Image (cartoon, helix red, strand yellow):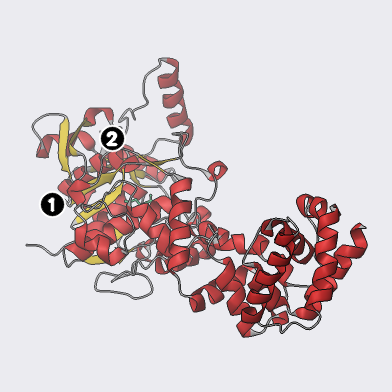
Amino acid sequence: MTEVRVRIAPSPSGNLHIGTARTALFNYLFAKKNNGKFVLRIEDTDADRTSQEYIDNIFDSLKALGLNWDEGPDVGGPYGPYTQSERFDIYPKYVQKLLDSGYAYECYCTPEELEAEKAEATKNKKPYVYSKKCLNLSEEEKAKLRAEGKKPAIRFNIAKAQKDFHENSILRFDDLVKGELHMDTSLLGDFVIMKSNGAPTYNFAVVIDDMLMKISHVIRGEDHISNTFKQILIFEALGAEVPRFGHLGMILAPDRSKLSKRHGATAVSEFVEKGYLTDALINFVALLGWSPSDGKEIKTVDEIAKDFRINEISSSNSIFEYDKLNWMNSHYIKMLSIDELKERLKPYLTKYNLNELTDAQYTRMVEITFEPLTLLSDITDAVPYFFGQDVEYDEKARETLESEISQDVLKTFVEQSADWEWSEEALHEKLEAFRGFYKEKGIKPKVTMWAIRAAVTGRLCGADMTAILAILGKEKVIKRINSAIKQTV
Ligand code: GLU
């Protein structure tokens, strides 16, 4: 059996899209499953839309997701270079081959002439198909045009390829995901494979690259299906082996429209900035179109690879449920060790002076605050009261502090705590007794604690109060309580 070789071929015209990450993942899984190779190719032929920043983003995002490639621009491999712009000298030879065999022809139509053809089609409410005006130019006519300084684009002769390799105008192929797909190729115009400036077009470069890189299976989004028909004909015209194709359904937003920026993050790096873990992201995108046989949704990429079968991918579109991703992310946050969390939370704590806390205090802060986090970035708003001298009260805290009972609780707290030992363990007992003291007076323990919490943290809910008091230390706590007494009476 031929070696399984798959590829992800992003165009660096933006940061790595979450949809491309899913395509990369399914290719990666297919390679793993079949002991094959996963290739990264950068398709940067459209120089105007390409930037190094996007290329770096693609590399970094794929690596962060754990989708490491066996061959690619940075690691090399036997069929490089793996960046299309470095392959420009490879393509003309194959254009010539197609010209010589009649599967391609020179087209001297000017942009104005083509525009006129398109306008005519629009006027007649017909889909535009190139007129093939230049298909039968004689050698003399071509020589004359060349002498006028005109440079031809090269078009692919669809009808010839279709006739030579198929019975009629219908082209069929067996899609790995969608089953048999077919198209009447007489509806496809003779498309350009090389522009008049010598640049190959996507459909041509991709075939030459897939052929020379010995790609055995092309797995990509279903938006490429119409390209696939064109590409199959080019493979055939070149006498090359046609790879197997598999097209994945699209990823739609919850409102069933195309996933776009207005729905939220779309690039992997944006999700990461927002506080999503790459492990959660990759697990989540795996479930867009694929379901584990044991029904267990939380899985590492290695576990998914064992269970993955390409023919079990759903052929329909998948809905990107942000709520589910959030649930999954909070689950993954809970699976991190405290040491990992301490590191991963730091980028979201830059507005605070972490030096105010010792390492032990920071550890304890993380231990008592991570559980409710949906996103790592949620930590920013969860912990302001661990920093600085004073706190800002939210509305509920202010109301609470204004009550007589709260003021009484706070004053008594200052008095009683004067000789307390200030360790978390000791505080645990002291607070217990303190609540008991008020309970005897008919005050519910939670009311007692609200007063303290409001004064010390500026809010009514949050992390474990005993631990908060211990982390902040006696001096700061008493200062905040005194200031809550003064301010509100
Ligand atoms: N560069 C193309 C894209 O980003 C690749 C398509 C393909 O996989 O052939 O859409």
Q: What residue lies at 12% left-to-right and 34% top-to-bottom?
A: 163
The residue closer to the viewer here, 276 or 94, is: 276
Q: What residue lies at 24% left-to-right and 38% top-to-bottom?
A: 157
On the image, numbered disc 2 is attached to which residue?
Answer: 137
Residue 286: which disc?
none
Where is residue 385 drawn, in percent x and y?
A: 73, 67
Report the number of discs.
Answer: 2
Q: What residue lies at 30% left-to-right and 32% top-to-bottom?
A: 189
Q: Which amino acid lies under the numbered mark 1 shown in the image of this protein?
A: Gly
Quadrant (top left, top right, bottom left, bottom right) of the C terminus: bottom right
Residue 344 horizontal side relative to residue 40, left or right: right
Instruction: Tell me the SS state at disc 1.
Output: loop
* Residue 405 in view (yes/no): yes
| 392 to 125, vertically: above or below | below
| 470 to 335, vertically: above or below | below
The residue closer to the viewer here, 50 or 132, is: 50
At label 2, counting other C-alpha atoms closer than 10 Å, the crowd grade (few under 14, some 14-19, many 20 or more) is some
Q: Which amino acid lies under the numbered mark 2 shown in the image of this protein?
A: Leu
